[in-house]
Every structure is written in C-alpha cells, then in structure tokens.
Image: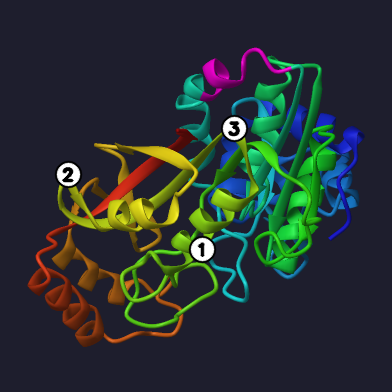
Amino acid sequence: MEPISCIEYSLISRFFKERNDLFTLLFQDEYSIPSEILDRQTIVELQEANLIYLDESTNNLKALVKINHTNGIFLCTDFITQTNNRVFPFVDEGNIFIEYFSNVRKHLKSRVKISAWDMCTGSGHPLILMEQELKKISTNVNVIGTDINERAIDYCRTNIALNNSRTEVLLSHFDVNINNSVSFDYIWSNPPFALSPQQDSLHTYGGRYGLERTIDVIRIINKRLDKNGMAQVLTYSIGNNKTDLLVSRFLEQELSNFRYEINILSGEKIWRFDGKKRCINPMPIEYMALRSTDQLYNLNQVPKESWLALSTEIKQKGYSHLYFVLIDILPL
C-alpha cells in the first residue's frame, strides 16, 4: 500500500466536507453508489488516488479502503469484511485516549523532552493523536509505534503520511526491534487480545481468560517505562465486581517498579455482534455465546458450544462479567 500524499489529504478533506453523505456511504459503510451521482473530475481524482474503482458492468463506484474521520484526522483501515490479517476497523479506542489524556498531560507537563511509544498501534490512530497531544506539552517529542501485523504497518505508514505526522512505526513483536537501551516517558497500549475459547485470529486471542498477551504488555512496560514515566493500557478483564478483577492480581505480581490505578469505563459498548458493539460495559459473561453467530469476528467458526463451555467455566471460578478497563501505570 503506497502512502497517501498531502495533496490527497486535501482531496479527501474536500470530499468529506462537500459530500459527507456520500463519503459515509462509500468509505465508512462500504456501499456502492451510482457513478452519475459524482462529477467526472472527482471520480478521476479519487481513482488516481487509488481510493475508489468503477465497476463497468454496473457503472457503480466502490471504495477500495475504509476511511474514518475523528478528532480532525483521517485514518485508512480495512473494511470489516476483510478477513485475512484484517487491520482492525476504526473503533473507540483513539477517542478514549483523548478523553483520558488529561492525567498524562498533568504528569508530563514539566518535561522538556518526551519520548513515547504506542505498543500494538494497528492503523496508528492513538499514535498520531499522541504526537499531536504531546506537542502541546513539549516542542521536543519523539513518538514511535510497533505492530506485528505487516498490513497494519502499511496502513499506519499511509496514515502517518496522510496526516503530516512525524511519528515512526516499526514492524515488531512488542519491543523486539527496539534497542535494549531505550526507555520511554509515556507508553500507550491497546492490545487487541480479547477472550476466546481458542486462537481464532491474530486480533482476538489473549489466552484462556483474555489476559495472557496483556500481561506480556505489562511486563514490557515494567521494563521499558522510565522510572518517572507513565503508561496507559486499555484492555479487558473478567471479574465479579469493581474490586475483584482478574487483571489486578496479575498487576500486583508484574509491576514491581510502579503502581497502578484501574478505571472501569462504565457504559462503553465492548462486544461486537454482527460487526457492531452491542453490549454495555460490564457485560454478563454468558453473552459471549452470541459471538458464535458473528461471521465477521468469529473467523474460524468456533462453535457456540465452545463459547458456552468457556463462559460456564469462568462463572464456576467466581467471575460473572467481562470488564473494559483503562489501567494507569504510575511511579511508586
């Protein structure tokens, strides 16, 4: 995937402002639209930018990429119907990053120089927002992102160019390709590893109870975060109430150099059925069985019986709900 130029940003921005209805249909809802709806010049420009194609058999236009717009930036990702190493379609995580950034701003406000890392960056949504927000604190900011998915890296580089960002992104399994001597003032991670009966995709498998990969992230933060730095991890945890979350047990074991605060994002919709988030946080664990009906996310067609067995096992261990949480990691 070739990076989109600044000129094409202007094209996308103009189309978004002038024909928001068609922008939504084409680039967000993946509908085909009749070519006669658009003027010829716009069609040519969008085709030259490799954003749409014309189906000559129907004379309809169809988007080649999903384009999201949020917090003033445009982000290209896969449509949800892409099933081979799909780069996660835009969700709410970047907006949550902005909503809860005030604590970070307060913590880093006196820094002359700030180094930051977005671990598991995907298409680069928080990565680009992170740079923008940190530059309001310091003029000397260095931001990098990493992801294990090559297609995600391609999209991320496209989005970096598209938004005139100076961030960098590396193909890396967590911190493997980052120099051992490097530490960070701020680390953000939204590990896309949820609860699943088996390893059904690159994006969803976090171990038997959804936390295996998240704990890997916590261990790396404990190693890579500057002693006076701050990190935030947006993830899931099974639990029984606000004070009985499985993730807190792991945090106590793994964060030897830092303390943590867990924020339960009450009211957020956290689980997708038919490609849409439909359950309010926290979600009753038995609702997981509905995941089996979602062809867009249950990629390996894990049977309903497996989901039911896992939810029963979890309830027998004393956990009743799935929680969506933001963990602030701070100096002792």
- 2 or 3: mark nearer the eye: 3
Mark 2, residue position: 243
Q: Quadrant of the C terminus?
A: top left
Residue 18 vs 321, above or below: the answer is: above
Residue 93 vs 331, above or below: the answer is: below
The amino acid type, in three-letter code, at marker 2 is: Thr
Mark 1, residue position: 216
The amino acid type, in three-letter code, at marker 3 is: Gly
Can residue 6 be seen?
yes
Task: Say which residue appears at 45% left-offset and 80% top-offset.
Answer: 200
Mark 3, residue position: 229
In the image, 219 versus 235, the foreground residue is 219
Estimate the x, y position of residue 238 in percent, counting from the top left.
24, 59
Residue 108 colored in magenta in the image: yes
Residue 103 vs 283, above or below: the answer is: above
Which residue range is magenta in the image? 104-111
Residue 45 colored in magenta in the image: no
The amino acid type, in three-letter code, at marker 1 is: Asp
* SS for callout 2: loop
